[in-house]
Amino acid sequence: MKKFKFNFVDLVVVLAIIAVVAFVVLQLSNGILDSSGGSATYKMTFYTEESTIYSLDNVKIGDPVCDESNDVSLGKVVSTEFSNESHAQLETADGTYVEAARPGYGSGSVVFEGEGTAYQYGAKFDNSKYSVGQTVTLRVGTSKLYGRIKAIEVIK
């Protein structure tokens, strides 16, 4: 019977295998622990301070909504409220901020509903997480809007 010798290379291989297994378990547990429940219907309000009026006029009830950065479907538009005056904040030379309306631009809210899952700080759609105050670029129908998530609520 031959005696097995354990050397430094064997130790490195064993530690590498343990590290890979630990990493996989950690990643799986993060996905499981992040969702605090099953699927739910979310109502999210998106606010844009400044978008072209023709883009806002193009948004219709029932239009699909998706996150432009990763093509995640967020649901469908259920209501809109737009103003023909933009509310962008501009920094002046002395470091203060002023609201400056821009001709041809408007502002407003798009409310949409979609299926997601809960997580500690808001809602999760596919593997993307959304929280109030988060800056996002949305594709709403054939329009592209820049703004922030204003509200998230569970409706079912």
Image (cartoon, grey):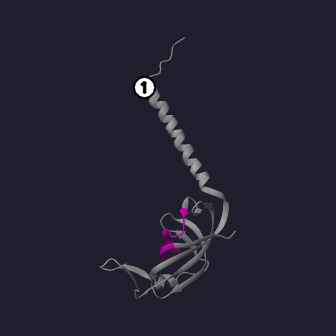
Sort mark 1 into few (<14), some (14-19) or many (20+) by Cα contacts within 10 Å. Answer: few
Q: Quadrant of the C terminus?
A: bottom right
The answer, for residue 61, to whether it is visible in the render is: yes
Most common SS among magenta residues: strand
Question: Which is more toward the observer, 68 or 50?
Answer: 50
Q: Quadrant of the N terminus?
A: top right
Q: Identity of the amino acid at label 1?
A: Phe
Give how far across and how far down residue 62 sits, in percent. 61, 77
Q: Is residue 80 above or below residue 113?
A: below
Q: Residue at x 51, y 77 (%)?
A: 47
Q: Is residue 78 above or below residue 136?
A: below
The answer, for residue 142, to whether it is visible in the render is: no
Q: Residue at x 54, y 69 (%)?
A: 132
Considering every residue shown, the one lying at the far left of the view is 93
Considering every residue shown, the one lying at the far right of the view is 156
Give how far across and how far down residue 73 sits, in percent. 57, 67
Q: Is residue 127 above or below residue 82?
A: above
Whether residue 92 sits left or right of residue 106 in the image: it is left
Residue 150 is inside the magenta segment: no
Question: Which is more toward the observer, 120 or 156?
Answer: 120
Q: Secondary structure at mark 1?
A: helix
Which quadrant of the structure image shows residue 21?
top right
Which quadrant of the structure image shows residue 80?
bottom right
- Residue under circle 1? 8
Residue stretch in magenta: 129-148
Give how far across and how far down residue 3 sits, in percent. 51, 14
Q: Residue at x 52, y 65 (%)?
A: 71
Give how far across and how far down residue 68 sits, in percent. 49, 68
Question: Which is more toward the observer, 138 or 43?
Answer: 43
